[in-house]
Image (cartoon, grey):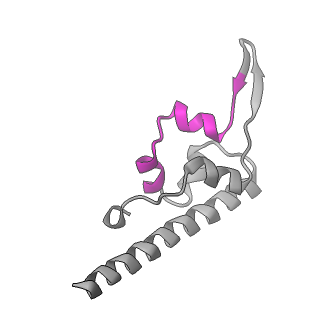
């Protein structure tokens, strides 16, 4: 991934496309946000760390328990990476053709 930089797609947008939602759970100290969005902050996952993860790591790292959502996220993650790589290769080829 380092060769082509990071995808420009927002992580939150990718999570919503996969079906992730904001979720609150009641703990003994009161309501606590318990969802993939809060995991990004809690685990200090920035775009560089997120996009360098393996496809199968993403759902586990963000503690997504619902199998369907985890599968959707894995597919969306793969597609975003592939799309970014393809666009970067096209730009690189165009730049070589201009020289």
Q: Is residue 69 left or right of residue 38?
A: right
* Percent of width and height locating residue 81: 50, 66
- Indicate yes or no whether the magenta region holds residue 23: no
- Indicate yes or no whether the magenta region holds residue 46: yes
Q: Nearer the viewer, residue 95 or 54?
A: 95
Q: Nearer the viewer, residue 88 or 76?
A: 88
Range of residues picked out in magenta:
32-52
Q: How many marks?
A: 0
* Percent of width and height locating residue 92: 32, 77
Residue name at image x 67 percent, y 46 percent? 64
Residue name at image x 75 percent, y 13 percent? 28
Task: Assign the magenta stretch its main secondary structure.
Answer: helix
* Percent of width and height locating residue 53: 47, 54
Q: Is residue 74 left or right of residue 68?
A: left
Q: Nearer the viewer, residue 40 or 7?
A: 7
Q: Quadrant of residue 30?
A: top right
Establish if 34 lies above or below 83. Answer: above
Residue name at image x 41 percent, y 58 percent? 6
- Judged from this view, the residue extending furthest toward the bottom is 97
Residue name at image x 33 percent, y 61 percent? 2
């Amino acid at each position: 991934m380092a060769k082509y930089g990071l995808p420009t797609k927002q992580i939150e947008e990718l999570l919503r496309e996969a079906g992730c939602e904001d979720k609150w759970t009641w703990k003994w100290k009161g309501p606590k946000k318990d969802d993939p969005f809060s995991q990004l902050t809690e685990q200090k996952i920035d775009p560089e760390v997120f996009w360098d993860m393996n496809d199968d790591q993403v759902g586990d790292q963000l503690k997504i328990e619902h199998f369907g959502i985890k599968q959707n996220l894995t597919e969306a993650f793969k597609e975003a990476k592939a799309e970014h790589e393809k666009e970067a290769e096209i730009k690189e080829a165009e730049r070589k053709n201009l020289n």
